[in-house]
Image (cartoon, rainbow, N blue to C red):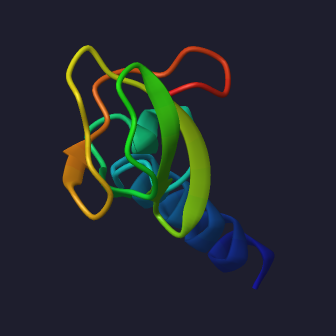
């Protein structure tokens, strides 16, 4: 009984290592979001249901779709 449980746990552990990342900063890079306020250099976007401060080299308008290219601390 104990050996079967141990084998089950090890199998589940190895399977979980193959799954894609679903949390943390790694999951934010490449995610799509929506611009909340018009901005030229920095403003707010909603990504995965959360509001983030963001920077952009281009002018963005409210409602525009954006993609996260990098993360610097809490700044997208």
The image position of residue 8, as x and y in percent, is 58, 73
What residue appears at the point 64 percent right and 66 percent down from the top-left corner?
Answer: 9
Residues 29 and 55: in front is 55
- Residue 64, image quadrant: bottom left
Q: Is residue 6 above or below residue 20?
A: below
What residue appears at the point 32 percent right and 58 percent down from the top-left corner?
Answer: 62
Q: In the image, 1: left or right of 21?
A: right
What residue appears at the point 32 percent right and 35 percent down from the top-left corner?
Answer: 68
- Residue 7, image quadrant: bottom right
- Residue 65, image quadrant: bottom left
Residues 40 and 21: in front is 40
Q: Is residue 32 above or below residue 58?
A: below
The image position of residue 72, as x and y in percent, is 56, 14
The image position of residue 48, as x and y in percent, is 46, 64
Look at the image and tell me in which quarter the N terminus lies.
Answer: bottom right
What residue appears at the point 79 percent right and 76 percent down from the top-left corner?
Answer: 2
Q: Can the viewer see residue 32 in this picture?
A: yes
Q: In the image, 57: left or right of 27?
A: left
The image position of residue 31, as x and y in percent, is 30, 49
Q: In the image, 67: left or right of 33?
A: left
């Amino acid at each position: 009984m104990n050996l079967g449980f141990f084998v089950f746990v090890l199998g589940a552990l190895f399977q979980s290592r193959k799954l894609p990342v679903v949390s943390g900063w790694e999951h934010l890079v490449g995610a799509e979001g929506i611009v909340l306020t018009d901005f030229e250099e920095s403003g707010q976007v909603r990504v995965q249901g959360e509001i983030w401060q963001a920077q952009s080299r281009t002018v963005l308008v409210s409602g525009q779709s954006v993609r996260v290219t990098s993360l610097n601390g809490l700044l997208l």
